[in-house]
Image (spheres, helix red, strand yellow):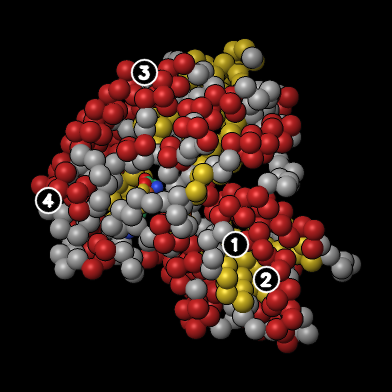
Amino acid sequence: METSAKKVLVKTYGCQMNVYDSARMGEVLAPLGYAATAAPEEADLIILNTCHIREKAAEKVYSELGKLRRLKDERKSQGGELLIAVAGCVAQAEGEEIVRRAKAVDLVFGPQTYHRLPALLARRAETGATVVEADFPAEEKFESLGRGTGPVRGVTAFLTIQEGCDKFCTFCVVPYTRGAEFSRPPAQIEAEARRLAGQGVRELTLLGQNVNAWHGDGGMGLAGLVARLSSIPGIERLRYMTSHPRDMDGALIEAHAENPKLMPFLHLPVQSGSDRVLKAMNRDHTTTDYLKLIARIRAARPDMALSGDFIVGFPGETDADFRDTLAVVEEVGYASAFSFKYSPRPGTPAAERKVQVPEEVKLARLLELQALIARQQSDFNRACVGKSLPVLVEKPGRRPGQLSGRSPYLQAVHLDGPEGLIGRVVETQIDGVGTNSLSGHYRTAA
Ligand code: SAH
Ligand code: SF4
Ligand code: F3S
């Protein structure tokens, strides 16, 4: 039977910050009578929450919009209406251009304006014209969202604490799509964390494009915030990402040595192992600075698992520069890492450079780097066999009787046990390793 309630489908691309935003969009729409759906055929509103970081990511949106246009036309021929919205970083970067390229779009709004969705939908209904909203009211957004986080399911949750970026790496669109660096006030973050803990969340991942640049009043840094959040009853584990090497201060490193709730996993991208390339990227640190920092972190927390991001084929990158990147990877030894071919982005300084690296060279370098990273990841996982690790049990596994959770180092762990263990940290004897996960059996439940 037909119900009068409306349905919304939010499709998420890009990083965890978009995952967080998509969930908040659902909450903003709930009071208007929108329930979530996963089926496009029954949606009254489809929102694409998009990513602009590389060309491929942005182009995906246009091919999806082509498909949605057909769905919209079909709906119209049946006397119904399907609204299509483009949100996120492509919306911010391209604005009106989206409306020119994809006529079926009804709403375009950037990452800092989705709290205004009720007003944007009303404007659309009143005028019948495409609505394009592209301000950066980050503070207003968080104040508005701060009034309530909807129900969550699961024992882990993302919590955005910082947005935007002032670093302007020469390859990157983020400062243009997310705006200037903004730190949410600690009281607002703590209130959200307490609500999440009250709903059964045991692990929080604090998010930000430069999460370790977060600061509160009176010189409070991320270490202070972590201390405050780890005293919340129910919160057993804290993580944060993504960090910039320049913002990794002594207090935060010390927190890793002293706070058992702060997990020993750090995503700390270096992008390249060549000082020449780092300079051209405007990263504002050298390879030596990075390696020294890693040494300090490992002195504080010897079992720290490291992760990173790498770009190959940045304009002007020579084979020798690329060898320097491989050498840094060899020296650090990553538990996991992401690597990408450089993708020229409109409006960024690096895209203007004449010395672009040919596609086939980029691909060859990427494959070589990825093979090295895969080897390191597999070594890291294999070294866990025979150890006992505390695993936060998150959900039932694929087989009956199986559970799935995560190690402190963010590895997926499969173990046998009763569902009553979900939400608890259990000491697990690791006895097997798959391509992307560990397996084991639990010894004791904490
Ligand atoms: N704020 C984070 C990264 C945000 S973007 C940081 O500073 O580390 C995530 C990753 O995408 C980056 O670390 C980088 O490796 C990659 N990336 C960003 N722009 C890119 C581009 N133009 N081409 C290829 N990869 C890119
Ligand atoms: Fe982009 Fe650099 Fe800012 Fe990271 S620090 S978001 S890579 S500009
Ligand atoms: Fe993409 Fe925007 Fe995140 S460009 S990576 S969705 S900040």
Q: Residues within 10 Å of mark 4 (few under 14, many from 20)?
A: few
Q: Is residue 189 above or below residue 175?
A: above
Which label was assigned to residue 300? 3
Mark 4 to mark 1 CA distance (whole Å)? 43 Å
Circles 1 and 2, Cβ within 8 Å, touching? The answer is: yes
In the image, is 318 to the left or to the right of 388?
left
| Residue 185 circle label | none
Determine which residue is flagged by label 4: 319
- First in sequence: mark 4 vs mark 1: 1
Q: Is residue 355 above or below residue 389?
A: below
Q: Is residue 32 above or below residue 142?
A: below
The image quadrant of residue 415 is top right
Q: Give the residue at the far right of this rendering.
A: 1
Which-is-in-front pick, marks 2 and 4?
2
| Spatial separation of the CA atoms under disc 3 and disc 2 | 49 Å
Q: Nearer the viewer, mark 4 or mark 1?
A: 1
Q: CA distance from mark 3 to mark 4?
A: 35 Å
Secondary structure beneath label 4? helix
Dot 1: few (<14), some (14–19), or many (≥20) neighbours within 10 Å?
many
Q: Amino acid at mark 1?
A: Thr
Q: Tell me the tag on residue 120.
A: 2
Label 2 or label 4, whichever comes before in sequence order: 2
Q: Amino acid at mark 2?
A: Leu
What type is the residue that disc 4 sits on? Answer: Asp
Q: Secondary structure at mark 2?
A: helix
Where does residue 392 sit, x and y in percent of width and height?
59, 26
Residue 40 picture quarter: bottom right
Q: Which residue is mark 1?
A: 113
